[in-house]
Image: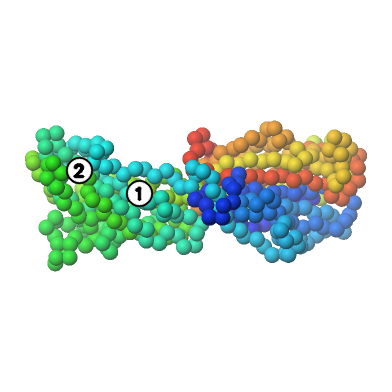
Amino acid sequence: MLRLRPGGIFRDTRGSGDGSGEPASHGLRVRFASLLGGFRRGPARGITIDGAQSRKVLQQFELGSGRAAGRIGQSPGWRSAASPGHGIAQVLTWRLAAAGAAVLAVIALPNAASAQVQYSPVCGVTGYATAPTTITYDPFSPGGLSQATIPLILQRNRTTQGGRTSEVSLVLVAPAGTPSLQVTYQGQNVLYQEGSTAGRPRALNSKDGGAGAAGEIRYTFGGSSATDLSTALNLRVTVPAGTDLSAGEPIYFDILYICSGAGGMQSVSSPTRESRAVRINVNTVSALQAYYAGSTLDFGEIGDVTTAQVLANPTAFTTSATNSLRVRSSGPFEVRLRSDNDFRLTFPGGNLTSSSDTIRYSVRFLGVDTASNATFGTKTCTRAGVAGTSGVLPIRAKLTEGGAGKTPSSNYADTVTITFTPIIMASGAQSCAGL
């Protein structure tokens, strides 16, 4: 039989490193030590966690059991390779220090020399806000991102005849489906939900009793020869814990603005909407969590089952379709699958070259039936989401041979290792949910 204990969360964060000086890993490995059949009754074996290579960067879990008096034995619990048998569930967190994968690419702010002139007959602005590379958001951190200062740079419009935007007042508008961020400027909220801007922006001469335009971002540009870029307007951005931000992707807000034109440029006195006018880059690490969810995988006793019987009724020798690996990720990820014995079960001391000592099987994962290490390769999946709504990955195992005529043993087994590697960007990624 094949046994796997549900639960156990394993995390892999492709980030800037934890300063420990440990080498980069190739991702998160979920190991199944698969015992798919038995011929003699014997004691049950449990599930273990193996911290192979470096416990900081690699985590595996095994499963396996025998047949005891016709019943499934009890697992002795989770254990670590560094301290076998301590029976305490492990939930470990680590960061990968892979070069070039620390944070999403930072888009350079425009400057007076490089910014392209924005021509329009009417006044207006666009904006760019990029977090410093030292500020990162880990979507699985319980603390979220607390009040990071992100400088906003506005760029004004001009006309071809020398007209220019003189003054602007705006608020940020979060379209439906935008991640739940909090943005303040000069201590006042300036990010509003769709249809809830509380009458802002107001007239440019509204000064709130000398306190400025509370709840708005207001800026006065210079004359015709002055730069079209504003000085840095420091936004305070808070990302609540669990916010589903995508690694490598900026956040776009609409703006609702009014502005005055000079030098013949038309003014805009009624609040006007500009879609995706402000881009905010939050350095979101590409992070991943994975765990197994399902029941005990059990083929039962197969010592008297012939290969003809297995092939005639494959459903009876296939594990449940409800068992799955659950992945949560802020970015895309790569998946690899490999069997220690090349998808052949054998017993300790068994000869892999002898058909009498092996039982062949296959694994269906990500929509692929795999019976050889040469066929699965590397699959690239789109982001599963921080909530894991797109990260349910069914896994099934199927016998392709029976146990009749094989060398008797109660612990025919193989180890299948599934490796998840979070990445920043991916071309050709597919949605792997439910495959």
> Please, what is the three-letter code of the amino acid marked with disc 2?
Asp
The numbered disc on residue 228 is 2
Residue at point 65%, 52% (across, down): 54
* Residue 27 appears in the picture as rendered: no
Marks 2/1: CA–CA distance:
18 Å
Is 138 left, or right, of 289 in this rendering?
left
Chain-order first, disc 2 or disc 1: 1
Q: Which residue lies furthest to the front in this view?
A: 21
Q: Image quadrant of residue 400?
A: top right
Residue occupying the point 22% across, 45% down: 229
Dots 2, 1 in contact, CB < 8 A:
no
Work out which residue is located at the far bottom of the displayed protein and give it: 209
* Residue located 87% across and 39% down the image: 351
| Dot label at residue 428 | none
Residue 327 drawn at (x, y percent): 57, 50
The residue pinned by badge 1 equals: 130
Mark 1 burial class by Cα count in 10 Å: few <14, some 14-19, many 20+: many
